Amino acid sequence: MKKKQQLLTKASEPDKVDVYMQKLKHPLAGVVAALRKIILSTDEEIGEEIKWNAPTFFYAGEMAPSDPKKYKRYMIVFNIYQKDCIRLVFPSGAKINDTSGFLHGDYADGRRLALFHNLEEVQSQTKPLQRAIKKWLTRLDKN
């Protein structure tokens, strides 16, 4: 008889992200807050934590164990180092195969970026952002 594979979940840490957000001193902090809200509202199995010194979003549902260095759960990492632009890094964005122009870059490691300079762009790009997230979730190897 085949042994049933153990499935693992990952706990979200919204309290830690709340503390980070309260301390965030950035000209586009409102853009970060708006994007966070949109990302989390897209699917109930999206979790968040502070990783790589920024809010990071991942699939929190059941998945088979995997090499942690492959970061299979991770969908979006904030890059807030620029003062005039918030970059959402999709570490495996190439898997989404976005043809709309929403995701930028053609990095060899498969990451893609979405860029936001103001709240108007957040508003106008909400649907493409949510489409990209939903597409990523369908491509995820949940087992």
Image (tube, helix red, strand yellow):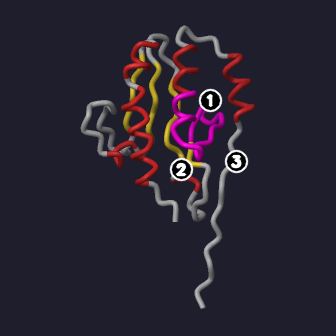
Identify the residue at horizontal 61%, vertical 59% (top origin). Answer: 62
Residue 93: say if magenta: no
Contact, mark 1 vs mark 2 (Cβ under 8 Å): no
Residue 40: say if magenta: yes
- Helix or strand or loop: what does disc 3 sit on? loop
Of the numbered discs in the image, which one, if any, rests on residue 71?
2
Residue 25 percent across, percent down from the top left: 63, 11
Q: On the picture, is 101 further left or further right than 122?
A: left
Q: Amino acid at mark 3?
A: Ala
Instruction: Tell me which segment is drawn in magenta.
Output: 37-57
Which circle's residue, 1 or 2, is located before the other in the chain? Answer: 1
Q: Answer above or below: position of 65 versus 94.
A: below
Q: Which residue is mark 1?
A: 53
Q: Which residue is mark 3?
A: 11
Give 114 or 91, whichever is nearer the viewer.
Answer: 114
- Helix or strand or loop: what does disc 2 sit on? loop
- Helix or strand or loop: what does disc 1 sit on? loop
Extreme left residue here? 99
The tally of labels here is 3
Identify the residue at horizontal 44%, vertical 16% (top origin). Answer: 85
Depth check, mark 1 against mark 3: the one in front is 3
Report how far apart the C-alphas of labels 3 and 2 lie in the structure. 15 Å
Q: On the picture, is 103 further left or further right than 134?
A: left
